[in-house]
Amino acid sequence: MDSLINAAARALATGDVLGALTHVALREDPPALALRGIAMAQLGEHARARELLRRAARDFGTHESLARARCVVAEAEVALAMRELGGTPKALTAAAATLDEHGDSGNALWARLILVRRTLLLGRLDEAASLLAEIDAGGVPPVLAAVASLAGAELALRTLDTAGARAALDQASAAAGRARVGALIAEVREAFAALERPAARRLHDGHEQPLRLDEVESLLESGALVIDGCRHGAKAGADWVPLARRPVLFNLLRALGEAWPGDLERRRLIAHAFRTRDPDDSHRVRLRVEMGRLRALLAPMADVVATAEGFALRPRGGRSVVVLAPPIDGAEASLLALLSDGAAWSTSALAIALGESQRTVQRALAELEQGGRARSLGRGRSQRWLSPPLTGFTTILMLTAAV
């Protein structure tokens, strides 16, 4: 590695993108192309970055497997930043193995962290926990230690372990301070701020109360019957009844929970469950059937009893009832939650993350755009979606071993 390449690599490792470009901006050799690609990625020019990284990978000879593997890792993070989540991570896993074989443990760890972050974005928490458990972040450079701790904090947040998330963020903050990378320090601060933002709303008697994540965790551990509109299910103590795939039953349960300790008349229940304002006898029959199904599912934690006017929820063991709703309600809440990270998402990536068809996601995005809650960039296959205001996404790439 010549002196200019080495200087550019060190500048990128500390976040000095412009300083790195002054060393390699006019060069066309493969190492310079790779470093320019990383610099463009850190500046947010992801399409140009991917083009440069692919050129560098092609120009490296077949005997330069280490350099090619580093290009694969860098391109994988560019794809992550562009929210292109399709395909399989086989190339990234193979690149990590190649880096390990050549003794480049730092970049091999980075490749595995990219895989963890991709898995977290897709909501595969068990898989992400397994991958993270295999990573040993001891004795690694501060940048890697900070990113590993951030991944651990995100996993803890998604599993409602706020104490674990705070501990991981404390470690990330200390490591980011040692690394002295401004973008990484800002990302840790943003993660701390997320702990103080409303994570859900408590609904009762027509009123709303915003709750932080630690308050949601306390409610779930309180033993109350919690009707969770964020994860679409019911929880009481150790019992959990998932209803994400049974929307009619969940709508009925939520309506009964909001009416607790009173009952709710049949006409209003039919409106909640079947979205009709003019019920007939068939709706009333269907309501009885769905109530029977709900009663069977809730048997360990509550009774659903018929009253003169309609139905009522009666928790077992003298429990109280708590109804939680997302901070943003409506059919587009999940979309807005994904867009809120500030990154530019493709329609296909959103469909993969939500488990919906691409056409369904396109219709929802069009409605959000009309309401000013989302905006698009580009056209056709290059179109990307953002949630205004754009908050930014920290992309830190390490290609060379000079860090």
Image (cartoon, rainbow, N blue to C red):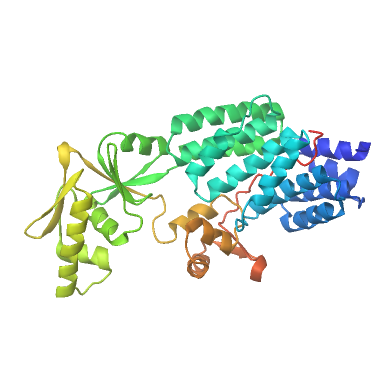
* x and y percentages locating residue 301 in the rendered image: 21, 43
Residue 228 appears in the rendering = no
Give the residue at the far top of this rendering. Answer: 139
The image position of residue 316, as x and y in percent, is 16, 41
Name the quadrant containing residue 244. Answer: bottom left
Q: Is residue 198 left or right of residue 265?
A: right
Q: Is residue 58 visible?
A: yes
Residue placed furthest toward the left: 308
Where is residue 96? Give x, y as percent: 70, 41
Q: Residue at left 74%, top 55%?
A: 45
Vertical side of 61 occupied by 131: above or below: above
Asked whether 91 or 12 is in front, the reply is 91
With 290 as the anchor, is 113 left or right in this view?
Answer: right
Task: Give the side of residue 282 with respect to residue 232, left or right.
Answer: left
Q: Foreground: 60 or 345?
A: 60
Determine the residue positioned at 72% across, 33% down.
105
Q: How many marks?
A: 0
Residue 176 versus residue 84: which sits nearer the camera? 84
Quarter of the figure with the C terminus: top right
Q: Quadrant of the N terminus?
A: top right
- Residue sitting at 61 percent across and 54 percent down? 88
Q: Is residue 281 above or below residue 21?
A: below
Residue 173: image location, x then y, percent: 61, 29
Q: Is residue 397 left or right of residue 137?
A: right
